[in-house]
Amino acid sequence: MRYKQTFGFVLVFWGVFLLGAIFARPYVNRIFFDPSTRASTITADQTRIERAKTADDLPEIKIASKEFGVLIPKINVNAPIKANVDGQTPKRYFKELKTAVGHLKGSALPDDSGNMVLFGHSSDIPGATSQYPEVFLFLDKLDKGDLITIFYQNNVYNYAVTTRKTVAADDLSVIADDSQNQLTLITCWPPGTNVYRMVVKAQKK
């Protein structure tokens, strides 16, 4: 009887420990990998990025995707973008977000006039294997004027951050097509939860 109780306690302990490790990971990463305290892995000068017309003009950067990708030097984001991801179908978009940032289906593209909406994870999904599990973990570090670069069909589109805010998870006003040449980045917030959304808005330069 005592053996069964001990065994049960050990199982519960390790279960709680593993769950804690999973949900604590984004917060640990925010401490040890804070981009504000580390040198950027994107070494190209910001002026060069802003002057570039095509992705080929930036050979010093190993761009994740010249066809459709996002680069945010301040928070070390360099990821491909999957176009036209259905934000209403979790099973589908969870699959797409394993390998890329999602471009919300129906929102503008870089060469369109309108609001382009991109979304990605701020923390791991338990049990899921992903190349970009925390791609937007540091979205809250972006400030007004920070550079966001979108690569699309080898062309370069630069945006400057205008606002950053936290909204309710069901607040759809942030994806409304109410502005020309706007970029909206969205992630679940706080990391490891889906209670709110961190939203960053940027305007095309």
Image (cartoon, helix red, strand yellow):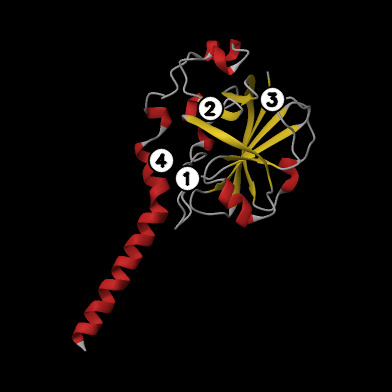
**Distance CA(mark 1)–CA(mark 4):** 13 Å
* Mark toward the viewer: 1 or 2: 1
Mark 1 and mark 4 lie on one chain; the one further toward the N terminus is 4
- Three-letter amino acid code at the position of disc 2: Ile
Mark 3 and mark 2 lie on one chain; the one further toward the N terminus is 2
Mark 2 and mark 4 lie on one chain; the one further toward the N terminus is 4
Q: Find out whether the residues at labels 3 and 1 contact each other: C-beta distance under 8 Å.
A: no
Q: Which residue is mark 2?
A: 72
Q: Residue at x 42, y 30 (%)?
A: 35
Relative image position of residue 44 (x, y in whole percent): 47, 15
* Mark toward the viewer: 3 or 1: 1
Q: Find out whether the residues at labels 1 and 4 contact each other: C-beta distance under 8 Å.
A: no
Q: Residue at x 48, y 52 (%)?
A: 192
Relative image position of residue 197 (x, y in whole percent): 61, 47
**Distance CA(mark 4)–CA(mark 3):** 27 Å
Residue 105 in which image quadrant: top right
* Quadrant where the image shows the N terminus: bottom left
Q: Which residue is mark 3?
A: 203
Q: Nearest the camera: 16 or 165?
A: 16
